[in-house]
Image (cartoon, rainbow, N blue to C red):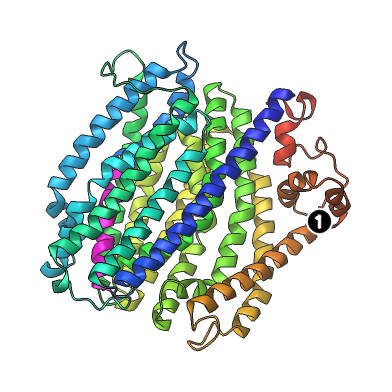
Amino acid sequence: MAKTTTRVKSIGASSLWLASGTMVSRILGFLRVIVLAQTIGVVGSASADAYANAMALPSAIYAVVAGGMLNAVLVPQVVRAAKDEDGGQKYINRLVTLGLIILAVLATLATLAAPILARIYGASLDLESLGLVIGFAYWCLPQIFFYGLYALLGEVLNARGSFGPFTWAQVFNNALSIAMLFVFAAIYGADPSGSRPISAWTPDMIAFLGCTTTIAVAFQAIILMFFWRRIGLTYKPDFHFKGVGLGRAGAMASWTFGMLLIVQLTGVVEAVVANLAFGASASLSALQNAFLMFVLPHSIVAVSIATAYFTRMSEAAADNDHARLVKDFSESSRLIGLLLVFSAGGLMVISPSFSRIFESDFGGAMLLAAMLCMNLLGLPAFSMLFLMQRMFYALEDGKRLFFAFLATAPIHIFALAISATLPVELIAVGICVAQTLIYYVRVSVLTLMLRKRLGPIDLKRQITAHLQQIVAVIIAMVPTLAVMWMLGVDRPEGFAMSSISGAIISCAIGGIVVAICYFVCLRLLKSRELDTLIRPVLSRLGGIGERLRPWVLAYPHATAESVAADDVDAALTAPASAGGER
């Protein structure tokens, strides 16, 4: 019992620590985007679109070769290696050494190939626009090494149960980036309308903006090195790569590489289509901003919960305990759904005001809001896809993931091709619809694959919970839409759209209204997942919490043991007779 209680605290504390770090980082990330928008513009800005193209290159290459493979390989392998006599120290040293060599070679080659890579993404650009993209790319592509170093060091920390540094390191990245943007604006002038012509960009301007961005990424990675000693690890380069099971990691990595290559190839198609609106309407820069807003709740909720559960699922898979693996998956799925369905609906109703924070032009803000809404329709599926991928990573089954993404890629490309035929001002909106479509298609395919691999995966209970959540958020959106309309969200002179401060206040008011309505609806629908979320909070409030139980809990008199099958907190702490020893 003591052992299980410790694990509950570990999950709760880890998720909270991850979420808090992610929250601070995302707030600073939003501030960085706002400052960037005031510095080089967003919608219809050739400067912003060129910078966005260049920043997409290191992210895409890192994601294919290093990012997902590190996530897929490192955590399960380090968890297994921890059972060795040295606690996995030798294995980690060799794996990290190999990873650093690969990253250094990759970053060097990519930087040298900047003109070629930029031409691939900018296939639909004119020569002048392409020249600015290439200029930024030379300074941005070295980020591949530092993104990889960050993931390499961070995933080892995660596998050892030290979750905080991985997210909090991003805070320093964003803070440094914001400071450097202010310096850039002070030296070269701000261009919030995005009207600066490409010809006005000098080599020193390009170097300053690109180089400082890369320095911030490097700082984010290097700071993690100081946390290794706190988990009992000391890194020493070890070039003896044979004899410690790296072949098994390589097999998993090869399938993951193939899957991520498919994702990034469709990403290239997406960039080419988006660049049809380069400098004219919402293009790659606007898409990146819409995605940043869309991914905020996913990063805070889904990533935090899934990352904390991923180590547990890897342990269950290593022990071949499929029952425990399915239980962890079901618990995390229902808890993520509770918060992500609310986030999707809530952000949709406040999307015009939310977009106004980033884009000062009313038309541009409404276009950004439309893109955000199309993305938000797929938010629950996006987070479920993230969780399902980690299930397959825990099982070290990259083969099924590869074939699932390969089989669905033509659907994505076809949807993007349709987007290319739309009027220029709607191309980005069409791309967002294509993204949402592919999330649901892939979740459906992976669900069938998981059932085939593991048998029953508690699907009925998950679907029931998610349907409750969808009904609740739809009902909650109705009064919130009325409130936002009264705040003038449909008019450029309205309070919600006339200024950044008005937009922020309106977002806060709308968010409070939709949150209260969603909570009341779930309470009336007797959502066990809502009880799961609130029960631990009430227990920490002592006598006040006991008095609130009948009002806020759907099952106030239920004991932890009686709802162990449905309650995450109780399921993790229940004795063997009620739910099995954890």
Write the residue at 19% across / 58% down.
207
| Side of 210 where 486 appears, left or right | right
Hey, which quadrant is residue 32 in on the image? bottom left
Region rendered in magenta: 44-64
The answer to whether residue 60 is magenta is: yes
| Side of 309 where 33 appears, left or right | left
In which quadrant is the N terminus drawn? top right
Disc 1 designates what residue?
552
Write the residue at 81% across / 52% down.
553
Rendered location of residue 570, percent (x, y): 75, 37
Q: Mark 1 is on which residue type? A: Val
Whether residue 512 appears in this view of the structure is yes
Rendered location of residue 562, percent (x, y): 83, 37
Hey, which quadrant is residue 517 in on the image? bottom right
**Considering only vertical position in the picture, is 264 above or below 244?**
below
**Considering only vertical position in the picture, is 455 above or below 355?**
above
